[in-house]
Image (spheres, grey):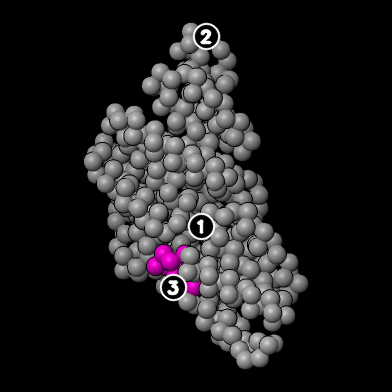
Amino acid sequence: MCYNPSMHDGDGNSAALAGLARRSGTLWREDPRGGFFPHGLRGRKAQVLELVGRWDDEEAVLRGNLESAARSGDRLLLARSEYGLAGVLYLKGDNAGALALYRRALEGFRDADDTAGIGLVMGGTGSVQRELGDLAAAADCYREQLRLGRQQHDIAAMSRAHGNLGILHCLQEKFSEAMENFREKLALAERLGDQESIGATVGNMGNVHKMLGDGRRALECFARQLEIARRLGDKRSIGAAVGNSGVIHTDQGDYPRAVASLETALEIASELGDRRGIGIAAANLGIAHRAMGDLARSERYYDLAIATGRRLNARQYLCGYLSDKADLMLLAGRLDEAEILVREALALAEEVGERPDIDKCREIAGRISEKRGVVGTGKA
């Protein structure tokens, strides 16, 4: 199993927030203590900071917006500020903090009957739920996001929803549905001229080609994604494109190129503070080093991935990391450790309810029993 770094919609939380600010037509807001504060301007600054990978600075700017909005007494402005901050917390892996802010923002948008804002929060909430492994809740959020976008004839909102649904279908291994949604998103992004979204979507389409075994078309997509990302200075997407190419090189047996690409992806994720990206790159490096026969280095990378998955409470990713390390321990003859790991992975897989993960864990458990000379049922 390899993990695909670029499964994100590429629209950028702060870009969506800036769109809301432009609709309000206000860059400056009056402060009840006297004077004005640059709410809209801060939002635009946050958009640039997100793109170039300065997420800590982006968080500081958006926290300033939140404090100013709270003082203003403007509930809709506060909801927009809560939504903005939630997005960067999600990028940095603070799922609990992001979810709490999304819920508060949803109340504010509903009170104001702001359909566009509600749709944005549905998308953000769905992504957190997806990260936490509740794919049914994520699907409900994304479908509502798409319904609201269609109701408002909002091309950008429909684009975001199709991208989110495509990512979800990929995780569920429904590749034809995933590709259909990515094609819809790409067409809408091209209508908007949204290069950031086009690049990320092309990368996601490359991941579908990779999962279907078409490495050549996947690499073509990742090369286009990388070209767009470099032109925009989009650091996160540069890391995703390089990391995705590394996965293909692993599949093709070109391990030196794979390791070089994946180490670059890990370095970029570390610079960004992208915990999710760190875990994915580390797991993929574990896979590459195992294939090269360096089990000790593979184990170290899996340990990093598992630690990151625990910190994020990213149950589906963590399940994969644990089962992959269990398989490594089985290969190394460390059966007790393998059994402990696969038990935890199976419990997570059953909790999430994803059949491919459950089957994988049971298959590993069966091989552990076989190695011990025990005839079992494939249960850990």
Q: CA distance from mark 2 to mark 3?
A: 58 Å
The answer, for residue 180, to whether it is visible in the render is: no
Q: Quick check: 246 left or right of 8?
A: left
x and y percent of residue 229 in the render?
35, 64
Labels 1, 3: front one: 1
Which amino acid lies under the numbered mark 1 shown in the image of this protein? Lys
Whether residue 103 is visible: yes
Going by the picture, which residue comes out furthest to the right?
A: 111
Question: Which of marks 1 and 2 precedes in the sequence?
Answer: 1
At 39% across and 38% down in the image, what residue appears? 301
Q: Which SS type dominates the magenta stretch?
A: helix
Q: Which numbered tag is attached to residue 377? A: none
Magenta residues span 46-55
- The quarter of the picture where the N terminus appears is top left
* Quadrant of the frame with the C terminus: top right
Residue occupying image coordinates x 53% and y 67%: 59
**Of the image marks 1 and 3, the number of the one nearer the N terminus:** 3
Query: Is residue 57 found left or right of 268 in the rendered image?
Result: right
Helix, strand or loop under label 1: loop
Residue type of the residue flagged with mark 3: Val
Q: Quadrant of residue 28?
A: bottom right
Q: Which residue matches tag 2?
A: 374
Horizontal side of residue 201 vs 216, given as left or right: right
Residue positioned 49% across, 41% down in the render: 307
Circle 2: is it few (<14), some (14-19), or many (20+) Cα within 10 Å? few
Asked if labels 3 and 1 touch by Cβ distance under 8 angstroms, the answer is no
**Image mark for residue 92:** 1
Q: Which mark is residue 48?
A: 3
- Separation (CA) of disc 2 from disc 1: 44 Å
Query: Label 2 is placed on what type of residue?
Result: Val
